[in-house]
Image (tube, rainbow, N blue to C red):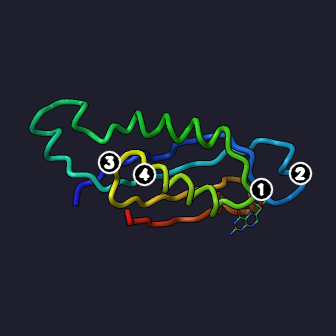
């Protein structure tokens, strides 16, 4: 299976369960892998036939910038649902990292795989 990926997409968001986290914005990093048959755009050389990673990235940036959740689990689930429902992706693998959230760790977060129902 082919994929289109977005790696290291950094977005500032209001996220976290503690009081101090409700008053600041924190950087989040998304690594996303989306199942897609790339043979069709490869044959046509037409951007319209692609799963356009620029369009997906913009939608995610817009959504995450305006989001407000406590848990990274909730945000990861919502972003995966947007990719599946709005871009017709059959399967998405999404890693959401919260760098600097735990002292001594480069990053913490969640990784999920979701398939279209
Ligand atoms: N599994 C999770 N654990 C924790 C989360 C989370 O979203 N999912 N969040 C926090 C705090 O917000 C933390 O990031 C602050 O340092 C703690 N554990």
Image mark for residue 85: 4
Mark 4 against mark 1, which lies toward the viewer?
Answer: 4
Name which of mark 4 and mark 1 comes first in the sequence: 1
Tell me where residue 61 sits by quadrant: top right
Quick one: label 2, few (<14), some, or many (20+) residues within 10 Å? few
Image mark for residue 5: none
Query: Residue at 43% across / 65% down in the picture?
Result: 114
Residue position for label 2: 20
Q: Quadrant of the C terminus?
A: bottom left
Q: Is residue 36 left or right of residue 111?
A: left
CA gap, disc 4 and disc 2: 34 Å
Residue position for label 3: 4
Query: Residue at 49% across / 56% down in the picture?
Result: 80
Name which of mark 3 and mark 4 comes first in the sequence: 3
In the displayed orientation, state which residue is furthest to the left.
Answer: 43
Q: Are marks 1 and 2 in contact (CB under 8 Å)?
A: yes
Name which of mark 4 and mark 2 comes first in the sequence: 2
Residue position for label 1: 16
The residue carrying mark 1 has its beta carbon less than 8 Å from ligand 1: yes
CA gap, disc 4 and disc 1: 26 Å
Q: Quadrant of the N terminus?
A: bottom left
CA gap, disc 1 and disc 2: 9 Å
Query: Residue at 40% across / 59% down in the picture?
Result: 92
Quick one: label 1, few (<14), some, or many (20+) residues within 10 Å? many
Name which of mark 2 and mark 3 comes first in the sequence: 3
Q: Is residue 63 above or below residue 90?
A: above
What x and y, as percent, mark residue 99?
67, 53
Quick one: label 3, few (<14), some, or many (20+) residues within 10 Å? some
């Amino acid at each position: 299976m082919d994929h289109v990926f977005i790696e290291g997409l950094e977005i500032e968001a209001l996220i976290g369960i503690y009081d101090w986290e409700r008053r600041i914005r924190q950087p989040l990093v998304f690594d996303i892998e989306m199942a897609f048959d790339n043979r069709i755009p490869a044959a046509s050389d037409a951007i319209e036939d692609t799963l356009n990673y620029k369009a997906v990235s913009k939608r995610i940036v817009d959504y995450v910038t305006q989001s407000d959740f406590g848990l990274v689990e909730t945000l990861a689930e919502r972003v995966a649902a947007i990719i599946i429902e709005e871009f017709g992706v059959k399967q998405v693998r999404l890693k959401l990292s919260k760098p600097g959230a735990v002292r001594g760790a480069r990053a913490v977060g969640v990784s999920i795989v979701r398939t279209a129902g």
